[in-house]
Image: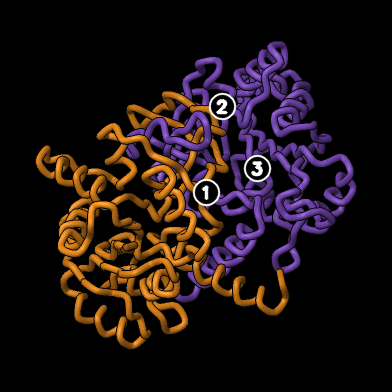
Amino acid sequence: MAALIKRRQVIIMVFALIFAGGTGYGFGAGLKPKQFLELYGKPIIIYTLEHFENHKNVDEIVVVCLESHINELKRLIERHGITKVSMIVPGGKTGHDSIFNGLIAMKDKAQDNDIVLIHDGVRPLITEKLITDNIEAVKQHGAAITVEPARESVVQSYDQVKINDVPIRSQMYIAKAPQSFYFKLIYEAYKRANKDHRKTIDPAHLCSLFDIPMFMVTSSKNNIKISVPEDYYMFRALYEAIENQQIFGI
Amino acid sequence: MITALIFAGGTGQRMNSRAKPKQFIEIHGKPILIYTLEHFEYHEEVDEIIVVCLEDWIDRLKNYIHRFGITKVVDIVSGGATGHDSIYNGLVALKKRAKPDDIVLIHDGVRPLITEELISENIKTVKKYGNAITVEPTRESVLRSMDGKFVSSVPTLNQMFVAKAPQSFYFEEIFNVYEQAQKDGFKSIDSAHLMNVYGKTLHMVKSTKNNIKITEPADYYLFRALCKAAENQQIFGI
């Protein structure tokens, strides 16, 4: 037992915290939440979970899910043979609240120096390498944000009518996921935001409010977020292209 | 007069298409550039089209234009070393035909999914405000990094937009700025960037959906998927 405790202290656990709390308003009322939409009979959330399930350095998965869909998710996880999901937590009102709910639920099992990869359930096209790169970057820098260089100019407008600034494109990046941290660092940041009644768009936005240094990890290609109907077509097209590559080496 | 200036000078280095520049890659037997040109061809307010093209491909482009029944192309100009130079070449060619208060819509040959509505909005906005930059709200956080390693700032999301095309101007204003940049030896990423550098106030037009730029292989698959979806809509009303 003593040996076991000692071992636990040395080994860093890696958690994936998957946000699947969205309601899918972007797809029109009456439809399934987008993370449950299926491609070839498999829900998008399962495609996403499989990447973490199959990654040897990821130990546990915590999913934050729409409360009304927790039972369905449990069924799907079992049917698709996902074994690493240790907890399913009900989502909050916003994405910010949902991530905080997930972190609170993890509090009992996660040590300060454990690593948590925060990912969107509707980003099913990540890769093993991207997960590995995130873990390595956290070990070196404490906080890692997956990014893509901006491929089109980004402009800033204060009034949504006139353009106030066109920053140099080579300095601009689009934040993707995973966004990854030492558990203590990100948990404390969300706690602090909660105390200050601040809500954020994503963990990168949160860390920027508190001046936490964030290292950028270059995303693998096609790391799309499925949030409007066109994205579903895009996912299908990319998935097919990736499968064709196996044979044609496109 | 309203002219569309279409930039088709890129070489497709990122596309794996070997010999073929991306604007000439075909989908269902029609080159991407032709899909783009058709939108301007069929828009009743657009009078003329000028295409800036890779020099080696000008003959083939003429061929395609003829074969696909595009009638508004009045000039085809050779591209320059960069996108900036290519647009400048196009404007110089346009100088011979355009009056100062003519309107020019600068567009990418590899953005085939624009709409009649977007072209109309561009024209309307130029008339109202003097210029029009097509934008889309960003759906993911935008980050700025000064060193390419660490995040320097995360600007407020609802203030950030992605610049698309068309980018549209009164001829005189855009021509003068490019002339000035030429004298100053300054090269820009796109016209919006250039105008901003020279202190011009720019106005935004919201892009219609799916106004993608085809620069990487994944974009080609996306375009094909969106074409298919759009065709299915005719029947299923998706």
Closer to viewer: mark 3 or mark 2: 2
- Residue shown at the point (24%, 54%) measured from the top left: B83
Question: Does dot 3 land on a helix, a strand or a loop?
Answer: strand
Q: Is residue B1 left or right of residue A209?
A: left
Q: SS for tag 1?
A: strand
Chain orange in the figure, letter:
B
**Disc 2 target residue:** A205
Position of B192 with respect to B58 (left or right) is right
In this view, the residue farthest toward the left is B183
Closer to the eye: label 1 or 3? 1
Q: Chain of mark 3?
A: A
Chain letter tied to purple: A
Split into 4 quadrants, where in the image is the N terminus of chain B? bottom left
Q: In this figure, which residue is indicated by the disc labeled 3?
A: A120
Query: Do callouts 2 and 1 point to residues on the same chain?
Result: no
Taking the spot 75% from the left edge, 67% from the top edge, the residue there is A41
Return the residue nearer the eye: A171 or B122: B122
Looking at the image, which is closer to me, B140 or B131? B131
Mark 1, residue position: B206
Question: In which quadrant of the rendered view does residue A199 lie?
Answer: top right
Q: What SS does tag 2 mark?
A: helix
